Image (spheres, grey):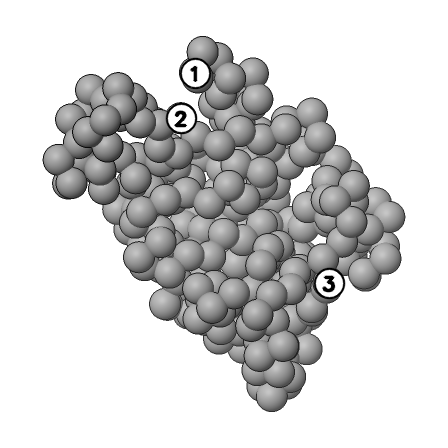
């Protein structure tokens, strides 16, 4: 750190980490990861991927990503929320992905007998825009430590896709601040399953709010996270 004129970090959480280690603030630049806003764009929910997995006629809250040790605990809390929502046949929690803890999470959902949780394997990358468009709400779950430190790239992707976002992150985290500041969705603590379930019910009951959040997220992604914007920042 002492030997370089400038250090680029991808989030304000990383910047604060370096400041605490004594790196002078004038040497630190925050430049986020970029997203391909031409590839990931708003599309109709009625699409081939939605039909393939029976998502077109449900209110779908989707997690898409690796099911790892770090995400497993938070996703188990999502199963707790699913238990609160099992009386509403409209709502489906879709978990898309694979990883070290995928089998354990699926086994836990089966053990609880949750009919409103569906597991979908990773899809070809070319299908990602239609996969994300199949969701009514996209989920960004983070444990406390990670939500205080960084912003996952999937959040930028979801904003570009023009879908409302439900963040599971602690208050005063960078994820919570970004979601609130951009207007792209809502954020609740990851360890409070009742509040997560209530947030999902509220989102399902507010089509106008969902549309506004989707448009706000897309606009924010274009303004701050497009390839052109990030390349300009580096230049």
Distance from disc 1 to disc 2, alpha carbons, whole Å, reads 7 Å
**Measured along the vertical axis of the image, is residue 120 above or below residue 5?**
below
Badge nearest the viewer, 3 or 1? 1
- In this figure, which residue is indicated by the disc labeled 3? 121
Dot 1 surroundings within 10 Å: few (below 14), some, or many (20 or more)?
few
Evaluate whether residue 118 shows in this view.
Answer: yes
What's the distance in space between the residues labelled 3 and 1, CA to CA? 36 Å
Residue under pointer 2: 31
Q: Is residue 137 above or below residue 96?
A: above
Rendered position, 68 above or below 208:
below
Q: Residue at x 85, y 55 (%)?
A: 51
Secondary structure, mark 3, is loop
Q: List x then y, in percent, for residue 8.
A: 35, 27
Q: Judging from the image, what secondary structure is the residue with disc 2 in?
A: loop
Image-quadrant location for residue 44: top right
Decide: marks 1, 2 in contact (CB < 8 A)? yes
Estimate the x, y position of residue 53 in percent, counting from the top left.
81, 61
Give the labeled residue for mark 1. Answer: 233
Mark 2 vs 3: CB contact within 8 A: no
How many labels sit on residues? Answer: 3
- The mark nearer the N terminus, 3 or 1, is 3
Is 201 or 94 nearer to us in this picture? Answer: 94
């Amino acid at each position: 750190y002492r030997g370089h004129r400038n250090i680029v970090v991808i989030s304000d959480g990383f910047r604060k980490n370096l400041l605490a280690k004594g790196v002078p603030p004038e040497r630190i630049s925050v430049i986020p990861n970029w997203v391909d806003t031409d590839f990931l764009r708003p599309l109709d929910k009625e699409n081939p991927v939605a039909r393939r997995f029976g998502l077109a006629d449900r209110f779908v809250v989707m997690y898409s990503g690796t099911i790892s040790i770090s995400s497993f605990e938070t996703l188990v809390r999502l199963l707790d929320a699913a238990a609160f929502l099992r009386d509403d046949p409209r709502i489906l929690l879709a978990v898309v992905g694979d990883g070290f803890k995928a089998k354990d999470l699926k086994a836990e959902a089966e053990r609880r007998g949750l009919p409103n949780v569906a597991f979908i394997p990773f899809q070809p990358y070319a299908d990602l825009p239609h996969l994300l468009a199949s969701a009514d709400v996209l989920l960004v779950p983070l444990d406390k430590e990670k939500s205080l430190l960084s912003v996952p790239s999937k959040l930028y992707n979801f904003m570009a896709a023009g879908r409302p976002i439900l963040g599971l992150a602690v208050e005063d985290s960078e994820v919570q601040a970004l979601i609130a500041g951009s207007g792209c969705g809502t954020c609740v603590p990851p360890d409070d399953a009742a509040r997560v379930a209530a947030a999902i019910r509220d989102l399902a009951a507010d089509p106008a709010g969902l549309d506004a959040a989707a448009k706000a997220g897309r606009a924010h992604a274009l303004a701050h996270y497009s390839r052109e914007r990030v390349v300009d920042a580096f230049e």
